[in-house]
Image: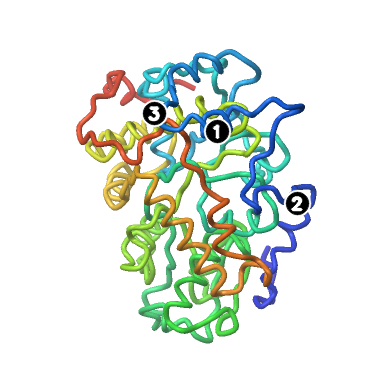
Amino acid sequence: MKKRIVTTLLTGVLTLATLAGCGNEAANGTVSEEAGEKSSAIEEALAAGDDYDLEAAFAKETGVGEPIRIISTFEGTCQVQTQVAYLLGFYEQEGLVEGIDYEFVESGGETGAVLLSTDQADVAIGLISGMLQPLDNGLEARAISGLHTGCITIVTRQDSGINSTADLAGKTIGVTALSGSQHIAALRALSYEGLSADDVEFIVYDADSIQQALLNGAVDAIGLGDYKAAIMGRDEGTKIIFDTSTDERLKDENCCVLFASNASIERKPATLAKLVTAIQKASVWISNNPELSAQIQVAQGYTVGDVNVNTELLKTYQYPTSLTSLREAVYRNFDDAKEIGLLKEDTDKDALAESSYLFLPGVEDGLSITEIEAPKDPQQFLTAKEE
């Protein structure tokens, strides 16, 4: 069932309601101290500077208190790095033990922002664009690692007469949520052509019906994840008119990012640094082995459908492991969000951007290695896992 939305009301009311209990420390760029006069682990790590010893810090953290809770990442093409990092033993290689240092929690259908804000999880994967308004509304979390480029497309029918985002003026666009990643990607694409939300009509559909809405002519275009867009193009003959993985303005920008709650950063920064390092190494392996990575994903049931389509998508992604690229992506997203009116009027976008990411002590600004072997034999994961 669809809901028509007045697109000029982009104030993130639902996000405000969800995050009403969040404080403003993240927006002010502060990391609070633990009870009493004891400094948090992250404060001690930052104070150590070049003398910081990640191994020694991790030895103090491991097995102490609750594990870092990671929202389950075992579904979806674009979460390949965390899947491979876990499956092929990159976490273990960094000394991380499941159940002691980290554990996976199910989302239960909630967004990463909600689970982080309600202390049901410590780490989530999210597109920067989808976290803009939660961060603006006080979500106490920071991006700690960029994952890859790509992810979002705008799709239309072959016979629609729409050949570019400039042709969307006066048209209807289907999305699965306002202020979600698809919606914001579409707004950015429109803004690059001098258009705004006032020039189109956005209509919200659930994920199960949005593709049919396009096919039956209920809307002129839809925002869609790139895997579904590729399958839809193959099976239905639709065409992509905007793709964040190929658009010259966005093709080098991190889309998916690892976010951690401020509380977990304070509590176990060395454990998080180990997680990020493991994912960095897995990223290098994936970039050198996209076909094998795609085969593993399909065999293990992490993504459904066509191995060839999956492989081609993984090849289009860039896997930037540098912290510098993360910072650039955060700033770029907040710049665009302010320009198109997604942030509160009194928000200092630069201050908010600066407080929305963190370079964890002990994590390299991009690994210098270009070749890496997986700790476990990848071939063993090419057989479909038993139910």
Residue 183, quarter of the rendered image: bottom right
User: 307 or 101: nearer the eye?
Assistant: 101
Of helix, strand and loop, which one carries label 1? loop
First in residue order: circle 3 vs circle 2: 2
Label 3 vs label 2, nearer the camera: 3
Say the numbered circle drawn on residue 207.
Answer: none
Cα distance, mark 3 to mark 2?
A: 32 Å
Cα distance, mark 1 to mark 2?
A: 21 Å
User: 355 or 124: nearer the eye?
Assistant: 355
Say the numbered circle drawn on residue 278.
Answer: 3
Tell me: 147 left or right of 104.
Answer: left
**Of the residues shown, which amino acid type is indicated by label 2?**
Thr
Q: Residue at x 38, y 25 (%)?
A: 384
> Given contact means CB atoms under 8 Å apart, are the residues at marks 1 and 2 in contact?
no
First in residue order: circle 3 vs circle 1: 1
Label 3 vs label 1, nearer the camera: 3
Label 1 vs label 2, nearer the camera: 2
**Of the residues shown, which amino acid type is indicated by label 1?**
Ser
- The residue tagged 1 is 72
* x then y, percent, for residue 257: 47, 46
Of helix, strand and loop, which one carries label 3? helix
* x then y, percent, for residue 332: 45, 63
For the N terminus, the image quarter is bottom right
* x then y, percent, for residue 307: 31, 41
Say the numbered circle drawn on residue 18.
Answer: 2
Q: Residue at x 33, y 45 (%)?
A: 319
**Residue 127 sits above or below residue 192 on the image:** above
Circle 2 Cα neighbour tier, 10 Å, few/some/many (<14 / 14–19 / ≥20): some
**Residue 120 sits above or below residue 239 on the image:** above
Cα distance, mark 3 to mark 1?
A: 16 Å
Tell me: 313 left or right of 172.
Answer: left
